[in-house]
Amino acid sequence: MSDHDHSPKPASLVKSGLAGRCPRCAKGRLFDGFLALRPACEHCGLSYEFADSGDGPAVFVMFAVGFLVIALVLWTEISYSPPLWVHALIWVPVTIALSLGALRAFKGVLIGLQYRHSAAEGVIDRSDDA
């Protein structure tokens, strides 16, 4: 039986990814520590060697958090016009906290999607070359 047999529905896949759980059984932990991936699921034995999220989660987090924080900064500036140091005091820690909080969740979801779609590293087919 393949590792990708009986794959879960996309909704449960997103839930397990957000919770940092195994994409196959949703019971085993996906991470050791904050972002380090475990070698395999301790519950169902799924090897996580297929998982390579790269910089994908960081890009999604930068776009989502950046959009949200800039919208809040502009709203605060228009509504209250605080000095620049107040903006820095508020928004730098908020940006860091939101980014770190979202990074693990986005990485879990992306790994779950890789599992669901049997994603693998691209290979160049050179069979046509003479």
Image (cartoon, rainbow, N blue to C red):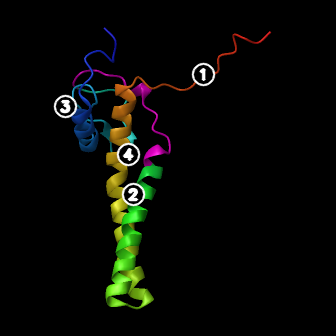
Query: Residue pushed farthest right?
Result: 130
Mark 3 → mark 2, Cα distance in angstroms:
28 Å
Amino acid type of the residue that numbered disc 3 sits on in the rendered structure: Lys
Badge 3 crowding class, 10 Å Cα cut-off, few under 14, some 14 to 19, many 20 or more, is: some
Q: Residue shown at 40%/30% (left/top)?
A: 114
Query: Can you tell which of label 2 and label 4 is closer to the viewer?
Result: 2
Tag 4 and tag 3, C-beta contact below 8 Å: no
Tag 1 and tag 2, C-beta contact below 8 Å: no
Tag 1 and tag 4, C-beta contact below 8 Å: no
Depicted 21 relative to depicted 67: above or below = above
Q: Which mark is residue 64?
A: 2
At which x and y percent is residue 119? 45, 26
At which x and y percent is residue 109? 33, 40
Q: Is residue 47 magenta?
A: yes
At which x and y percent is residue 30? 30, 36
Is 32 placed left or right of 125 in the picture?
A: left
Q: Quadrant of residue 117?
A: top left
Q: Which residue is mark 4?
A: 35
Mark 1 → mark 2, Cα distance in angstroms:
31 Å
Q: Which mark is residue 27?
A: 3
Amino acid type of the residue that numbered disc 2 sits on in the rendered structure: Ala
Is 87 placed left or right of 20 in the picture?
A: right
Query: Can you tell which of label 1 and label 2 is closer to the viewer?
Result: 2
Mark 4 → mark 3, Cα distance in angstroms:
18 Å
Quadrant containing the N terminus is top left
Dot 3 lies on which element? loop
Q: Which mark is first along the chain, 4 or 2? A: 4
Q: Which residue is mark 1?
A: 123
Residues in magenta, as a range: 43-57
Name the dominant secondary structure of the magenta segment: loop
Question: 63 or 24, which is in the foreground?
Answer: 63
Q: Residue shown at 27%/21% (left/top)?
A: 7
